[in-house]
Image (cartoon, grey):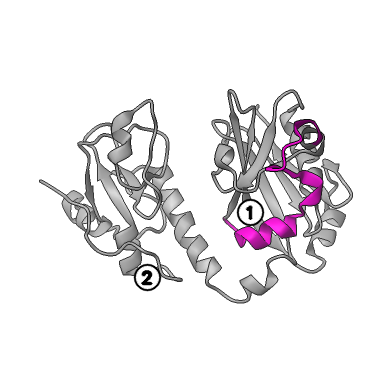
């Protein structure tokens, strides 16, 4: 049984119609492993010098729990459901047994994010709202995370102090903040104040000069979106946060009155955590 990529236009409109979803997300049938994975065709193709054949593969596989093969075939969810004989024909609810649950969950989140971005007065509120940012380290996301509440005026320097509090990172190596999944390719180039002074490179931006509202307006930051941080450019460790909630008006003040922060700056606070058992 042979499958091919759809020749339809994969550009995504402002809302995720059924056709747009079908054109964007496809099942990667590799015939290796116990489940099949999902590829986002709109994302940039994967690349990596350690595995040359990846450069020719389309889109982005939505988890890191298997390697990709140039021999893989691709099929949309409707045809895949007909082939496997199950009745799940939309990316919603729980994943079918035949499909990777991690990939499935990521698809659902991406679809929800597009819908959220297209709804209501979101664009008008960006830059005036606060956020709950759930920070994690790649590879440890299930074992450990920390929720940091930030106001629009919170500087990246304040956020950095709280991030370093739970990661125990020091200034021996550079760390840099960026937009979603940018890491070493950061377009923000925001680094801590002390490191900015030591590096003396105009291509970087001092963390105290950038507020959360600045980042929010640049990235149209909303629930489900992410920011990234890389530590040690030589042997990098990757950290990221997911926007778990958006707060307007007095919601942050009310939240902080209800619960005692674990740690705080003048405008931000760690309010919840999960530590390794």
Q: Earlier in the sequence, mark 1 or mark 2?
A: 2
Q: Is residue 32 left or right of residue 199?
A: left
**On the image, numbered disc 1 is attached to which residue?**
244
Q: Secondary structure at mark 2?
A: loop
Q: Which residue corresponds to the image point at 79% horizontal and 69% vertical from the top-left? A: 249
Q: Is residue 70 left or right of residue 173?
A: left
In percent of width and height, residue 140 lies at 58, 31
- Image vertical order of residue 86 relative to residue 199, above or below: below
- Image vertical order of residue 146 relative to residue 171, above or below: below
Asked if residue 90 shows in the view, the reply is yes
* Mark 1 or mark 2, whichever is nearer to me: 2
Magenta segment: does it hold 31? no
Q: Which residue corresponds to the image point at 37% horizontal and 49% vertical from the top-left? A: 95
**On the image, numbered disc 2 is attached to which residue?**
17
In percent of width and height, residue 256 lies at 84, 54
In percent of width and height, residue 143 lies at 60, 32
- For the magenta stretch, what is the residue range? 197-224
Few, some or many residues within 10 Å of mark 1 (<14, 14–19, 20+): some
Q: Which residue corresponds to the image point at 73% horizontal and 28% vertical from the top-left? A: 169
Q: Quadrant of residue 138?
A: top right
Contact? badges 1 and 2 (CB < 8 Å): no
């Amino acid at each position: 049984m042979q499958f091919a990529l759809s020749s339809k236009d994969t550009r995504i409109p402002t809302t995720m119609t059924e056709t747009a979803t079908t054109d964007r997300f496809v099942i990667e049938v590799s015939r290796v492993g116990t489940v099949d994975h999902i590829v986002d065709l709109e994302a940039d193709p994967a690349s990596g010098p350690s595995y040359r054949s990846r450069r020719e593969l389309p889109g982005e596989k939505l988890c890191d729990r298997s390697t990709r093969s140039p021999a893989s075939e691709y099929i949309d969810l409707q045809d895949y459901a007909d082939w496997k004989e199950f009745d799940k024909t939309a990316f919603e609810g729980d994943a079918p047994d035949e499909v990777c649950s991690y990939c499935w969950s990521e698809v659902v989140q991406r679809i929800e994010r597009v819908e959220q971005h297209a709804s209501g007065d979101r664009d008008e509120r960006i830059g005036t709202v606060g956020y709950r940012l759930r920070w994690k380290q790649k590879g440890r996301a299930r074992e450990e995370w920390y929720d940091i509440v930030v106001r629009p005026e919170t500087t990246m320097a304040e956020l950095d102090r709280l991030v370093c509090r739970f990661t125990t990172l020091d200034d021996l190596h550079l760390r840099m903040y960026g937009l979603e999944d940018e890491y070493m390719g950061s377009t923000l180039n925001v680094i801590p104040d002390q490191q900015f002074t030591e590096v003396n490179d105009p291509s970087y931006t001092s963390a105290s000069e950038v507020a959360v509202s600045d980042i929010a307006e640049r990235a149209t930051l909303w629930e489900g979106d992410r920011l990234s941080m890389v530590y040690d450019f030589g042997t990098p460790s990757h950290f990221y946060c997911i926007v778990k909630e958006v707060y307007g008006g007095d919601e942050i003040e009310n939240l902080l009155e209800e619960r005692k922060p674990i740690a705080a700056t003048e405008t931000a606070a760690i309010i919840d955590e999960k530590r390794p058992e």
